[in-house]
Amino acid sequence: MVKVAIVGATGVVGTKMIEMFEQYGIKADELTLLSSARSAGKSLQVMGEELTVRELTEETPKQGFDYVVMSAGGSTSRQFAPLFEENGSIVIDNSSQWRMHEDIDLIVPEINAPKLGRKIIANPNCSTIQSVVALQPLKEQFGLKRVNYTTYQAVSGSGSGGLRDLEEGARGKAPTTYPHPIHDNVLPHIDVFLENGYTKEEQKMIDETRKILELPDLAVSATCVRVPVSNSHSVHMNVTLENDATEEEVRDAFRNIPHITLVDNPENNEYPTPLESTGRSEVFVGRVRRDDSLENTFHVWCTADNILKGAAQNSVQILKQIMERE
């Protein structure tokens, strides 16, 4: 009997996880939806069945779950993930709490697989996921020397609060999630600022890229920007390759990969956009061109649905990966 739990089931990502369970054919004899006391008692439709959301308490991990998928924030994960682990559960966590722990696997299923040294598995940052999916074929064919990111991140990355700030800002209301209005504005500020001048979001992308791609010495930098877009993140990557390549060879690296869609026909105004990638499972890549100011360096633009591939979908893909292996 396979017992699975979703923690944070009523949130923006949690509800998408429920959809992904059906899409990826996750088989569970018993599925439990968990949340804070505030959301407990709600009813949600799951694969044609109505389930009541239960409150997550310190007794919950003792109920013998085989797999637990969490999207409830770092503090909740810090408290509860080890408790589930101690009680034999494999935990897939969507927060930033465990990503850079040396003994915790950081997984994008198109790139790597859990080694399960510990039973907690980390889901990477949303912008990192789509970026490394695009970088992996370049790494395999040409090698990577340097990556410089600039992100254009949708407000759904901040959950319901970000969406509310965008919607209510259009009516002149003051923001409650961001330090400045996001409507008709861009904010070069995601997460808290660190002593080195980078934000925590930027540092996440730097550190996680190196860990996932297994390139600890890769030169990486990032600037992360919040933009007034509802959903789907965009990332501009300036990539220096180890081995010589032409523009067409770089484009060819992205062709015929099921989880990457190349859209690169600027003469006809065809390039990836957030609207195009919203609701889609793959990463969109385009605007490939040589950077003439640096040797063997290329510009690559990519977009992806941050709630799907950047969070819910990737987490459920990890779950399916583990269940099939076991």
Image: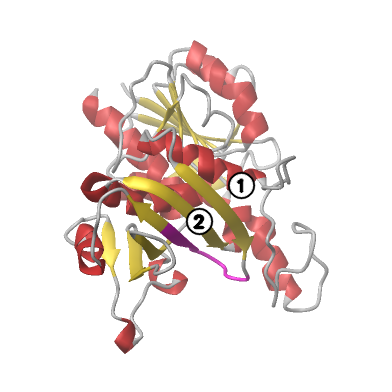
Q: At 64% from the left edge and 63% from the top edge, which residue is drawn? A: 163
Q: Residue furthest left?
A: 256
Q: Residues within 10 Å of mark 1 (few under 14, many from 20)?
A: many
| 204 relative position to 236: left or right | right
Q: Is residue 291 visible?
A: yes
Q: Relative to 36, does residue 252 appear above or below in the rendering?
A: below
Q: Secondary structure at mark 1?
A: helix
Q: Which residue is mark 1?
A: 201
| Magenta stretch holds residue 39 | no
Q: Is residue 80 left or right of residue 258?
A: right
The x, y position of residue 296, in whole percent, is 33, 59
Give whichever of discs 1 and 2 has the lower sequence position. Answer: 2
The vertical placement of 192 against 58, above or below, is: below
Magenta segment: does it hold 230?
Answer: yes
| Kind of residue at disc 2 | Tyr
Residue, x 39% and y 69% (percent of image)? 292
Residue 16 in view: no
Pointer 1 and pointer 2: residues touching (CB < 8 Å)? no
Q: Nearer the viewer, mark 1 or mark 2?
A: 2
Q: Tell me residue 109's x, y (percent).
A: 31, 39
Identify the magenta region. Answer: 228-238
Residue 66, image x and y in percent? 39, 21
Residue receiving disc 2: 149
**Towards the viewer: 248 or 313:** 248
- Say whether residue 242 is left or right of residue 75: left
Foreground residue, 76 or 251?
A: 251
Q: Residue furthest bottom?
A: 268
Say which amino acid is labelled 1: Glu
Judge the density around disc 2: few (<14), some (14-19), many (≥20) Cα neighbours within 10 Å. Answer: many
User: Which quadrant is the N terminus positioned in?
Assistant: top left
